[in-house]
Image (spheres, rainbow, N blue to C red):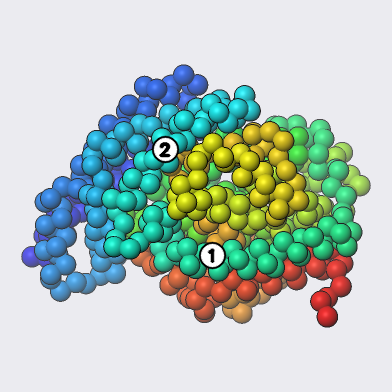
Amino acid sequence: MMERIYEKIKTYMDRAVALKRALALFEWDNETLAPVKAGEETSRIIGTLSGEYYGIMTDPCLKELTEEWGGQMQEGEIRMACVSLLREEMERLTAIPREEYEANARLTAKAGAVWAEARRKNDFSMFAPVLKEVLGYQKRFARYQAKAGQKLYNVLLDQYEKGFDMEILDGFFGRLKSELVPFLKRVMEEGRQPDDAFLQGDYPEEKQEQLARMTAEYLGFDFERGVLEVSAHPFTTSLHNRDVRITTHYKDRMDSSLFSVIHEAGHGLYEMGIGDELTLTVAGEGASMGIHESQSRFFENIIGRSMAFWKPFYPRVRSIFPEQLANVTTEQFVRAVNRVEPGLIRTEADELTYSLHILVRYELEKALIEEDMPVELLPEAWASQYEAYLGIRPQKDSDGVLQDIHWSQGSFGYFPSYALGSAFAAQIYEGMKKKIDVEGALERGEIGVIADYLQKNIHRYGRTKTSRQLLIQASGEDFEPDYYISYLKEKYGKLYGLKEDS
């Protein structure tokens, strides 16, 4: 009886997952290969597919099946997780009228092109009307879904990092503000800046592409199950654990592409590591946006900017750029890629200042959603907060409020996951060091030892465990941001020769 019910549920789930993957392919295509003028018509297709997905997930028969299955003796962690996730999605979507859901899908499908044009022309006023419309949909959807007394922004946050509401995030970001803003000031005033001029210059794109592929392979990214392409904004898309797609960009700074590839490879390894029994189910994805980001930030920063990582790998990099790096030692290279310099662009930010970029976005999202701040005030508010936290002020919209695509996609509540991911990564690193010799493995070039630990403790579970459960499993503790703050202060205090606080 129970087996028959689940097989019927699975029929719905298979169709829903297939549609989600089709929509992911459109996202991939829009950012990589789609013609510039494809947006309007393609958005109609996306709207139709989104409507079909909505129809499956809100079908009364599926609701009846999940209720009937829930009343039986439940067995099997994967099945329980899948049915639970289906119920959550059903509840979320049923609250939204179908015509509004489809309209929002069409809007966000074309809003990215409006954002890109506004950014190219450095004119926020071109994007503001569309942003206002996108924001309106997100607030309206949150009202539909909110439980009694629940804040709208908490509804949106819950979609990306369940259990991390404004109360927790206010405390987390408050700690970052009180600890890292003054520490950054000390680094800039008292520290000795490394020379990184050699990272910029004549680095041919074809050689950067060679380095990108070599680096991804070294980390364990399987090119028989994955591809690497070019996009304006590096990202990762996964159809299943045997089709994982990452992108990068190539600029005149070789470390820009290099660390984008390391970052996206971290995401890719997560997706490739999801268990075969989970892939192509609703549980066959990353546990949360924060846990996903923890994997990319772990590889990009904790591993990728460590001396131990570069000892065996740097000679291979220098073999690709023998002239450019001829007189650059491993130590000089590592210091250069760890240079701290407050900048305007989040995706180019150093490890120490990165979460301050997210702090700005978190506070502005709260203002937009909880305080109804007019969209037109965003450029000035953005500039003022950058000046307060990072000591610099954007002079043009393309370097300020227009630098990220996320809001055009309706992804309000997403940004905090980036900072949480960095904090999760530091905590996972502390737990990992208690079980394996991380530095020794890196110096021997044995990246697989580290990847295996992550696959065993995080990747293979997909969404069958929450971010908190995975943190406890990988580190032995629930979320504790002190690990992140201590990691940053210890690492950069040493790199910049700061005297220890008395």
Q: Is 442 in front, or is 230? A: 230
Q: Is 40 in front, or is 264? A: 40
Which residue of the protein is positioned furthest toward the top in this rendering? 37
Question: Which amino acid, mark 1?
Answer: Asp
Figure quadrant of residue 324:
top right
Question: Which amino acid, mark 2?
Answer: Val
- Disc sitting over residue 124 in the figure: none
Which residue has dot 2 on it?
A: 134
Assign the N terminus to one quadrant of the image.
bottom left
Q: How crowded is the residue under tag 2: few (<14 C-alpha within 10 Å), some, or many (20+)?
A: many
Assign the C terminus to one quadrant of the image.
bottom right
The answer to whether 184 appears left or right of 215 in the picture is right
Q: Residue at x 50, y 41 (%)?
A: 374
Q: Is residue 238 visible?
A: yes
Q: Is residue 360 above or below residue 40?
A: below
Q: Residue 41 in the image: x percent, y percent?
A: 36, 22
Q: Is residue 449 above or below residue 260?
A: below
Q: Is residue 315 above or below residue 457?
A: above
Figure quadrant of residue 383:
top right
Q: Residue 27 in the image: x percent, y percent?
A: 43, 36
SS type, badge 2: helix
Q: Residue at x 62, y 74 (%)?
A: 482
Figure quadrant of residue 229:
top right
Q: Residue 60 in the image: x percent, y percent?
A: 12, 50
Q: Residue at x 69, y 72 (%)?
A: 486
Which residue has dot 1 on it?
A: 170
Q: Residue at x 82, y 63 (%)?
A: 186
Q: Residue 402 in the image: x percent, y percent?
A: 59, 36
The answer to whether 143 appears left or right of 35 in the picture is left
For marks 1 and 2, the one nearer the N-term is 2
Q: How crowded is the residue under tag 1: few (<14 C-alpha within 10 Å), some, or many (20+)?
A: some
The answer to whether 4 appears left or right of 290 in the picture is left
